[in-house]
Image: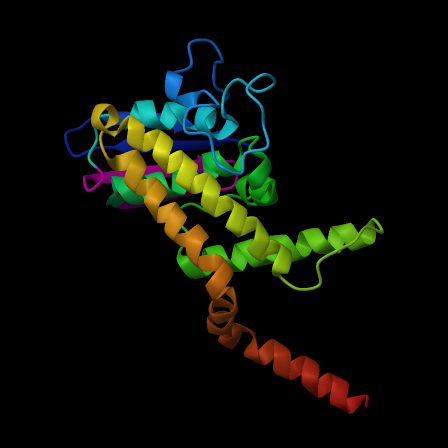
Amino acid sequence: MAKLVYRFSFPDGRAESLDAGAGVAQAGLPAWTELGFHQCGNCPLSAAETPHCPMAVRLVPLVALFEKVRSYDDVTAQVESDERTVTRRTSVQKVLRSLMGLLSASSDCPHIEFLKPMAHYHLPFSSREETVYRVVSTYLLAQYFLRQQGKPADAGLEGLKAHYRELQQVNQGMAARLGAIRDEQGDSSVNALVLLDLFAHSLPDSIDADLEELMPAFQEFLKMNYDRSTDHG
């Protein structure tokens, strides 16, 4: 992953940072990262080969950073990449939502591989509409590359919906992990996971409606191409 650093300024003057591209030391990992600790029901990994949950390991620095911060506290977050710097004042919970999504998508969890390109082209604090646009565009571009390689490709979005149904179970498993340490770590990490799960849960059933809401932005493009096709018809 390219450079991607989240910097936080709290109302009490405290400043923290987290390098999302940095690796996590494998020594001394907390018990809640062990694969068998609230393992996801659809997890294909075995503890013998993978002792720790790949997604949980990626979240360790995030949980440590916000262990005593309340989810509704205000924070100023600055996200620095090679291309741009984005600054926003918002709640801890919304910052966690953005950062947790990034760290999860950059993990080696088998069920989140389809989101890895989005982690590579991360957009901090994206709205639901922006996320839907990016998810669908990423998925369809992947299908294009598959066709270019002569491999089977999904002409629609059924495969994407299936991926998100699997991701629902992953988010539920992660929520159980973080819920088990809630009393020690505070509620911010759990609440951010709830936000992610709300999106993952709703997308398979509402993606068609979400795309309808995006269609007005394409009206001129669609009309132009329709006019061209009729001119040559």
Residue at 59%, 35% (x, y): give it: 110
Quarter of the figure with the C terminus? bottom right
Q: Is residue 125 visible?
A: no
Where is residue 147? Give x, y as percent.
Answer: 79, 55
How many numbered marks does the figure carry?
0
Q: Is residue 70 left or right of residue 225?
A: left
Q: Nearer the viewer, residue 86 or 133?
A: 133
Where is residue 134? Give x, y as percent.
Answer: 54, 55
Query: Residue 110 colored magenta?
Result: no
Residue extending furthest toward the front: 41
- When the figure is inspected, residue 70 is found, relative to residue 229, above or below; the finding is above
Quarter of the figure with the N terminus? top right
Q: Nearer the viewer, residue 134 or 38?
A: 38
**Residues in magenta?**
71-89
Query: Residue 72 colored magenta?
Result: yes
Quadrant position of residue 91: top left
Query: Which color scheme is applied?
Result: rainbow
Q: Nearer the viewer, residue 179 or 128?
A: 179
Residue at 55%, 45% (x, y): give it: 118
Dominant SS of magenta comes to strand
- When the figure is inspected, residue 177 is found, relative to residue 170, above or below; the finding is above
- When the figure is inspected, residue 2 is found, relative to residue 164, above or below; the finding is above
Residue extending furthest toward the left: 12
Where is residue 25? Give x, y as percent.
Answer: 48, 14
Where is residue 181? Give x, y as percent.
Answer: 28, 26
